[in-house]
Image: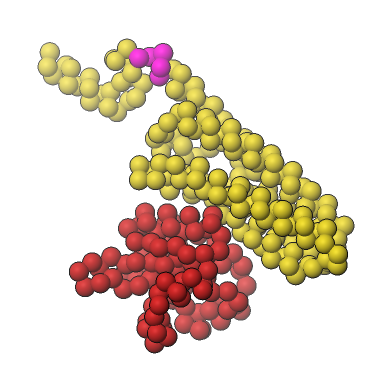
């Protein structure tokens, strides 16, 4: 009998579903796995639609017990930083005469932080915007910047939803987080 | 070099051989990322947001400053600028976004 119980415990340690079955919390497990699926699907969308790239995985990999909110912290820093950059860019584009050199500095900053969190769409549009800037093509800059602003707004919403769900799910094991 | 940025590794004291890195970057996002990367490799990390603050923090003579290994981090992949950094004495040049493999490579060199 003792052997039987201990082997069941060993099995449950290896298989989370089994564990919950034995401990009679199957409904909770089902809900948790539903959230996991939702989370995975949300993330897959973000990647498939090109909003995020590999760098975001890198950030998730850096999150662990010693740094349990790392992703959320970095994302928060990014939106604070990028909002400021974008206000500066807005102002620089209104300014007369335009200082394209100054504008490029702000763009470099915005592109850099987008790249650091894996915000692929924003990063790519910033690259295009910098090209217009280097050509001193104001019209191109304005059109491209509008796209950057849209990408920023959408990404912010999607990441807020993602992080909210991540918080609900709680400590997620690495196996279910990595990959798409 | 147009801007003094990049992590610097200081030799640890006699008792504590842990390397202490001073990470300098004006981007809060990049500071957070590089600090996390280095800390997960067991480095002790201090971050500052400017070269000026870095020099104030270090408060060293130029002869001592020269002893500190410097690694440059930049998002710009400009070969002649990278070469210049290395020629001017940088230990290494990391292209952003910095990955764990970049830090691992550094760890091996700094042993």
Tell me which corner region of the image, top left, top right, bottom left or bottom right, holds residue B20: bottom left
Q: Residue at left 53%, top 32%?
A: A164
Which contiguous range is marked in magenta?
A: A25-29
| Of residues A58 and A92, the one drawn nearer to the viewer in this rendering | A92
Tell me which corner region of the image, top left, top right, bottom left or bottom right, holds residue A20: top left
Q: Is residue A58 visible?
A: yes
Q: Residue at left 45%, top 23%?
A: A33
Name the dominant secondary structure of the magenta segment.
Answer: helix
Quarter of the image that includes the N terminus of chain A:
top left
**Position above or below: B41 against A177:** below
Q: Colour of chain B?
A: red
Q: Residue at left 53%, top 68%?
A: B50
Q: Name, please, the residue furthest toward the bottom.
A: B63
A26 inside magenta stretch: yes
| Of residues A126 and A76, the one drawn nearer to the viewer in this rendering | A76
A96 inside magenta stretch: no
Q: Name, please, the residue furthest toward the left.
A: A2
**Position above or below: B110 against A167:** below
Callout count: 0
Tell me which corner region of the image, top left, top right, bottom left or bottom right, holds residue A100: bottom right
Q: Position of residue B91 (x, y in %)?
A: 44, 76
**Position above or below: A114 against A51:** below
Q: Residue at left 86%, top 61%?
A: A138
Q: Is residue A126 visible?
A: no
Q: Position of residue B34 (x, y in %)?
A: 46, 59
Q: Position of residue B88 (x, y in %)?
A: 50, 84
Q: Colour of chain A?
A: yellow
| Of residues A135 and A76, the one drawn nearer to the viewer in this rendering | A76
Q: Position of residue B110 (x, y in %)?
A: 35, 71
Left or right: A84 as drawn, with respect to A150 = left
Left or right: A124 as drawn, with respect to B106 = right
**Position above or below: A120 against A132:** above
């Amino acid at each position: 009998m003792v052997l039987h119980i201990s082997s069941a415990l060993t099995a449950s340690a290896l298989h989370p579903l089994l564990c919950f079955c034995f401990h009679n919390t199957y409904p909770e497990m089902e809900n948790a796995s539903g959230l996991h699926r939702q989370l995975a699907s949300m993330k897959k969308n973000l990647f498939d639609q090109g909003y995020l790239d590999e760098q975001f995985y890198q950030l998730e990999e850096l999150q662990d017990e010693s740094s349990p909110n790392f992703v959320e912290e970095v994302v928060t820093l990014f939106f604070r930083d990028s909002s400021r950059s974008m206000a500066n860019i807005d102002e620089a584009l209104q300014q007369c005469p335009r200082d394209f050199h100054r504008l490029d500095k702000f763009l470099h900053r915005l592109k850099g932080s987008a790249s650091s969190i894996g915000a692929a769409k924003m990063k790519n549009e910033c690259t295009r915007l910098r090209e217009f800037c280097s050509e001193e093509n104001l019209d191109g800059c304005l059109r491209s910047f509008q796209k950057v602003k849209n990408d920023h707004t959408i990404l912010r919403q999607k990441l807020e939803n993602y992080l909210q769900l991540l918080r609900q799910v709680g400590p997620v094991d690495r196996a279910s987080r990595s990959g798409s | 070099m147009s801007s003094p940025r990049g992590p610097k590794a200081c030799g640890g004291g006699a008792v504590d051989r842990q390397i202490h890195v001073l990470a300098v970057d004006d981007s809060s996002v990049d500071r957070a990322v590089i600090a996390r990367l280095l800390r997960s490799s067991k480095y002790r990390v201090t971050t500052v947001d400017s070269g000026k603050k870095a020099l104030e923090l270090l408060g060293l003579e130029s002869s001592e400053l020269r002893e500190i290994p410097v690694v440059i981090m930049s998002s710009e992949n400009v070969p002649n600028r990278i070469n210049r950094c290395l020629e001017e004495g940088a230990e290494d040049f990391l292209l952003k976004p910095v990955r764990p493999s970049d830090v691992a490579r550094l760890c091996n060199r700094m042993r």
